[in-house]
Every structure is written in C-alpha cells, then in structure tokens.
C-alpha cells in the first residue's frame, strides 16, 4: 500500500451499492480504480433501503453487509462501512458523502460508479452538492454507454475497466432457477447465499 504523503492526506475510494449480492463486477471496478487513481483504500458502502429499488424487496441489510465483508476481507485496501445501514431509512448518496466528508475531513474522496448509475446521477437528491463532496469516477459496464451526464467541469473521470457482464439481478435470477453463481461472485458469497437460502424465490 502507498505510504501516506507528508500532510497525511489520503485518497479514499467510495463504492456504494446495494450489493444484493456483491459480485466480481463490483470488485474488479474497485480494484481497477484503486490502481489507476493511486487510492489508499476503497470503502464499500452497502445501502440501507435504496430509494430506487422500492419495487422489489431487497435482502436484509445484515446479509448484504456480511456478503460485502466476506468478499472484501482478504484485500488490505478494501474496507466496508455500515454508515448507510446504521443511518436507517432510505439511502441517498448525498447523506453518505456528507457523512464520509465529515469523518475524513482531510482526505480526498473518489466516488466510484458504473455507467448505468452515472447516467442517473443528475436525478439524485441534491445532485449539485454531490460534486463538491467527492470526485466522481465513472467506469465502463457491459450493456451501458459511459458518458459524462453533464457534471460540472472536472467533476468526473471516465475510465475503462475489464468488462464483466455480471449483475446482481442476474445472480439472483440464477439462484432462483437453480443455476450456478460460482465464479460470478466470490466463493464465500456462494456459500453464504446457500447457508442463508437467499434468492430462492426471486422473480
Ligand atoms: P442490481 O442488478 O440489483 O441493480 P448491480 O449489479 O447493478 O445490481 P449495484 O449494487 O446496483 O449492482 O451496483 C453498485 C455499483 O456498481 C453501481 O455503480 C453499478 O453501476 C456498479 N456496477 C455493478 N456491476 C458492475 C459491473 N459488472 N461492471 C462495472 N460496474 C458495475
Ligand atoms: Mg444496479
């Protein structure tokens, strides 16, 4: 890991997601951005109740949190934050970033988002303020076009990451059908899904 520079300022990535379940697309995106942007750490932040996903029932926050911990535990640069889960209520990225900004007042924040989420970002709550709290990094995702949705000048960097056509939606559907999710999600996550019988009757 990179040594902290003289003023102690660290470069922190923030990877928000529902992680229902976390999969290798999330992990590759975080790893690639960490390397390219010389990040000291990437903090994975599982959502509480996500406001966009009101139409389907999301797995319990503790299950999503634990799968995220299992998936990231072996990487010394990765950590998991409970802030969105513990805040309660619906999760808005503006609240996540305000809280992280306050906690890591001296550090630089880099919010990592896939092409699909980036395209929606101007519709997020308090979008104007979001870009003053963190630098945004949009990453490629198969099936989605990566473009700057009109963020303030210099507010977003767009980067290509290795293409993994994996989504949590597809992983849930596979489990429900009895198809394998081995190698789409980390082995420990496959075992956790089985142990807790998650996604058995997903639509
Ligand atoms: P769902 O299908 O339930 O929406 P998802 O696979 O999109 O799940 P999320 O938890 O919604 O996963 O995504 C969290 C973040 O990770 C978002 O910014 C999303 O764009 C990004 N992301 C998810 N999968 C990939 C992937 N395969 N490649 C690059 N980025 C991804
Ligand atoms: Mg998604």
Image (cartoon, rainbow, N blue to C red):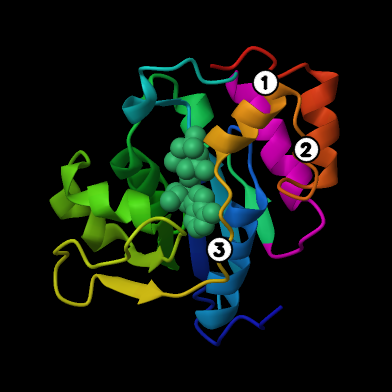
Give the vertical position of 111 relative to 102 (above or below). below
Query: Which residue does the image show at 74% across and 47% down from the upper left?
Result: 71
Residue labelled with disc 1: 176
Residue labelled with disc 3: 29
Give the vertical position of 63 relative to 39 (above or below). above
Mark 1 or 3 closer to N-term? 3
In the rendering, at what x and y percent does residue 131 appear? 23, 60
Mark 3 or 2 closer to N-term? 3
Which dot, 1 or 3, sits closer to the camera? 1
In this view, the residue in front, 63 or 149, is 149
| Residue 82 visible in this rendered orientation of the protein | no
Residue 108, quarter of the rendered image? bottom left
Q: Which quadrant of the rendered structure holds the N terminus? A: bottom right
In the rendering, at what x and y percent does residue 117 appear? 34, 49
- Would you say 101 lies left or right of 31 here? left
Q: Which residues are magenta?
A: 60-77
**Hey, which residue is sitting farthest top in the picture?**
201
Mark 2 or 1 closer to N-term? 1
Q: CA distance from mark 1 to mark 3?
A: 26 Å
Query: Which residue does the image show at 61% across and 27% down from the upper left?
Result: 173
Whether the residue under disc 1 has CB within 8 Å of ligand 1: no
In this view, the residue in front, 57 or 97, is 57
Whether the residue under disc 3 has CB within 8 Å of ligand 1: yes
């Amino acid at each position: 890991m990179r040594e902290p520079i003289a003023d102690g300022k660290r470069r922190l990535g923030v990877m928000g997601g529902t992680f229902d379940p976390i999969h290798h697309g999330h992990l590759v995106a975080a790893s690639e951005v960490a390397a390219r942007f010389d990040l000291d750490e990437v903090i994975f932040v599982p959502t509480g109740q996500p406001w966009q996903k009101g139409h389907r029932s999301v797995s319990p926050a503790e299950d999503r949190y634990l799968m995220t911990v299992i998936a990231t535990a072996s990487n010394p640069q990765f950590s998991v934050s409970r802030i969105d889960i513990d805040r309660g209520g619906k999760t808005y990225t503006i609240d996540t970033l305000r809280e992280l900004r306050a906690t890591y007042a001296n550090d630089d924040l880099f919010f990592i988002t896939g092409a699909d989420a980036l395209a929606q970002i101007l519709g997020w709550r308090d979008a104007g303020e979001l870009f003053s709290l963190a630098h945004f990094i949009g990453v490629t995702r198969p099936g989605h076009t990566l473009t700057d949705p009109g963020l303030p000048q210099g507010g977003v960097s767009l980067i290509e990451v290795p293409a993994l056509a994996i989504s949590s939606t597809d992983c849930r559907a596979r489990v429900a059908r009895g198809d394998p999710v081995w190698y789409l999600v980390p082995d420990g996550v496959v075992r956790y899904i089985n142990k807790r019988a998650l996604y058995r009757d997903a639509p």
